[in-house]
Amino acid sequence: MLDSNILISTIEWIGEKWNNYLSPVSILRCYEGGVLLRLGKYKRDLKEGLNFKIPLIDEIHTCVKTIDTFPLSPIDITTIDGKQVSVEPIVMFDIHDPKKYLIDTNDAAGNIRDVSRGTIADYLTDCSWEEIKEKKTLTAIKNAIKKECEPLGITVYKVFFARIVTTKVYTVFKE
């Protein structure tokens, strides 16, 4: 007797393969962006709704393009006035160019995290503790991240600090 989990997995696998390779149509939802590749080469951007494709020849790649946020792991820096500071940023963004995001960039999601962390750390090390707490600092950081993320197909709208604290650093040396 066939196990029901195997049967369900098989049906899901067949449905996925049908949709990805054999179906002559693909439907993009209003919150998705996508691209069509023909024999592995970029052919065109896709529009919301019904999109036609050639089975086995064309493949479709999609991404969610609506506004989203992601938290960054804490960033620890030393300010120009010698304070140890830890911030936990949150970046609000959306994907404005699915082709850049999906094709022209390798691991865009990882890249936006790396670019954001690097930009924030670089900017904050040139600030004093008092400057870090000012709103204009967040605006400047947002603008710097926005400029770096534009080539990735990403628009950055806002940067927040979920947590911002001064910390003490202890160094232990072993011989």
Image (cartoon, rainbow, N blue to C red):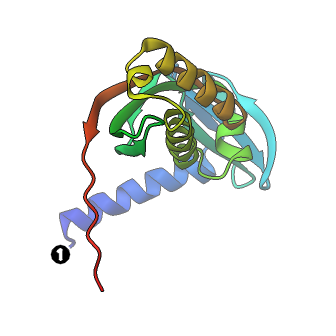
Residue drawn at the location 17% of the way across and 75% of the way down: 1
Identify whether 105 is placed above or below 165: below
Give the camera-side residue of 66 and 82: 82
Residue 82 visible in the shown view: yes
124 left or right of 174? Answer: right
Give the camera-side residue of 23 and 91: 91
Give the camera-side residue of 54 and 121: 121
Answer with the quarter of the image where residue 56 lies. Answer: bottom right
Q: Residue 121 location in percent, x, y?
A: 50, 41
Residue drawn at the location 58% of the way across and 38% of the way down: 62
Mark 1 sits on what residue? 1
Query: Under tag 1, what secondary structure?
Result: loop
Identify whether 95 is placed above or below 5: above
Inspect the image, locate mark 1, and give the three-letter code of the amino acid beneath it. Answer: Met
Residue 153 visible in the shown view: no
Q: In which quarter of the image is the C terminus?
A: bottom left
Q: How many labels does the image show?
A: 1
Q: Residue 127 location in percent, x, y?
A: 50, 29
Give the camera-side residue of 47 and 157: 157
110 left or right of 143? Answer: left
Q: Residue 123 location in percent, x, y?
A: 55, 33
159 left or right of 100? Answer: left
Seen as rendered, the residue at the extreme bottom is 175
Q: Residue 66 location in percent, x, y?
A: 49, 22
Residue drawn at the location 25% of the way across and 42% of the way down: 167
Seen as rendered, the residue at the extreme top is 135
